[in-house]
Image (spheres, grey):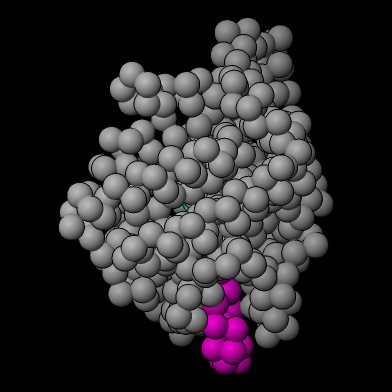
Amino acid sequence: MSRLPVERLRQDFPALQREVRPGVPVVYLDSTASTLKPRPVIERLADFYLHHFANIHRGIHMLAEEATEAYEQARARVSRFLGAAEPEEIVFVRNATEAINLVAKSWGKTFLQPGDLVLLTQMEHHANIVPWQQLAEEKGIRLAFAPLTPEGRLDLEAFDRLLAQGPKLVAFTHMSNVTGVVNPVAELTRKAHAVGARVLVDGAQAAPHFPLNVQALGVDFYVFSGHKMLGPTGIGVLYGRRELLEAMPPFLGGGGMIREVTLEGFRPAELPAKFEAGTPAIAEAVGLDAAIAYLEQWGWEAIVEHERELGAYLLPRLLEIPGLRLLGPTEMTDRAGVFAFWLDAAHPHDVAEVLNHYGVAVRAGHHCAQPLHKHFGVPASSRASLYLYNTQEDLDRLLEALRQVVPLFG
Ligand code: PLP
């Protein structure tokens, strides 16, 4: 049994005490889409709004100073969490999607030339495909997608062959939101740097689940969303190495991001304000601070161990369900607790509906990864995903409900 006091921490999540009907409590297995929020995060948000809120950076009064301090404290926490060299390398944005768009539309537009190659992979979320396709249309850059093995891992030999073509940027996910595959970021980054490419890593699924160190990984850009790690919606993070962020033009223009404006033009502010035009998501950043503190309070080791135990329990039992095809590796090595599957008996939406009847919340659809579903030859899947508040009992409820689906649809 893991060291994580799961029963105790579950008390922090009132949503887990909800019932779909009397006597049938909710089993939440949809954390990959977004996680539930614990009381300490909500209480921090409420306290901030009730007692400390004002617009930041611009006021010389008590509340403005307190709000500014809380916002910058959040940046410092994120910087420590990511192992960045300094808080100025942390830019607050709305979500991982916006962070990738910022890099594409600022760095990409400035430093990529027509014909330059951007190397992605076939396991990317649409957030790490579409901004590059837009840039390809706009600037005539070329895109290549590293293929996958049949079970959905990156084909490393094919990746090396594509690297030999000299991409200017390699952008890939740290952890897949469909297969749960965890990519060897440090190794891929080292290889990409060896051919002179910059590296962007989509950490939307990794940041919630394991401790990170962007300097040890060696990456140039790293992005994630607060709402997938117990934080509020509307707050995300772009980490970029100072030297790169400094060379990039602002993405959005307006208040907050300038040093000086005249009728003739403007001079941008220093980092990170240069990339934070307009009033930012102040309270949401404070909420993210509380979310990271909450996770750290239990300890990453205990969280990782707990999720690994749950995954190791669920995986072989899922594979025993008749007609179930897993989209992803069938053993837990280098994969995390995300399990997308196809059931021969029923469409994923019908599966999700039946599971909901038994109180089990899963997601159905293409999970914003249509090319990856094409790789597996299915249009959609059902997806169960684990987080620190899940228990073995949750998984038994899922398995029991899944066993009901097959006879129901024949
Ligand atoms: N990247 C991955 C791997 C994801 O799973 C997601 C969301 O599911 C995103 C990016 C986009 O996150 P957001 O919608 O918070 O911008």
Q: How many marks?
A: 0
Q: Looking at this view, is 327 or 231 the one in front?
A: 327
Q: Nearer the viewer, residue 264 or 215?
A: 215
In the image, 292: left or right of 373?
right
**Residue 322 position (above or below residue 18):** below
Where does residue 223 sit, x and y in percent of width and height? 59, 53
Q: Position of residue 10 (x, y in %)?
A: 59, 26
The magenta region covers 154-171
Where is residue 295? Give x, y as percent.
Answer: 69, 35
Q: What residue is drawn where x is 61% and y is 64%?
A: 332
Q: Is residue 211 visible?
A: yes
| Residue depicted at x 75% and y 66% | 218
Residue at 80 percent across and 62 percent down: it is 216
Q: Is residue 219 left or right of residue 276?
A: right
Query: Up-down: is 179 above or below 364?
Result: below
Q: Quadrant of the C terminus?
A: bottom left
Of residues 253 and 408, which is closer to you in this image? 408
Question: In the rendered image of this protein, does residue 34 appear above or below residue 145?
Answer: above
Residue at left offset 44%, top offset 74%: 122
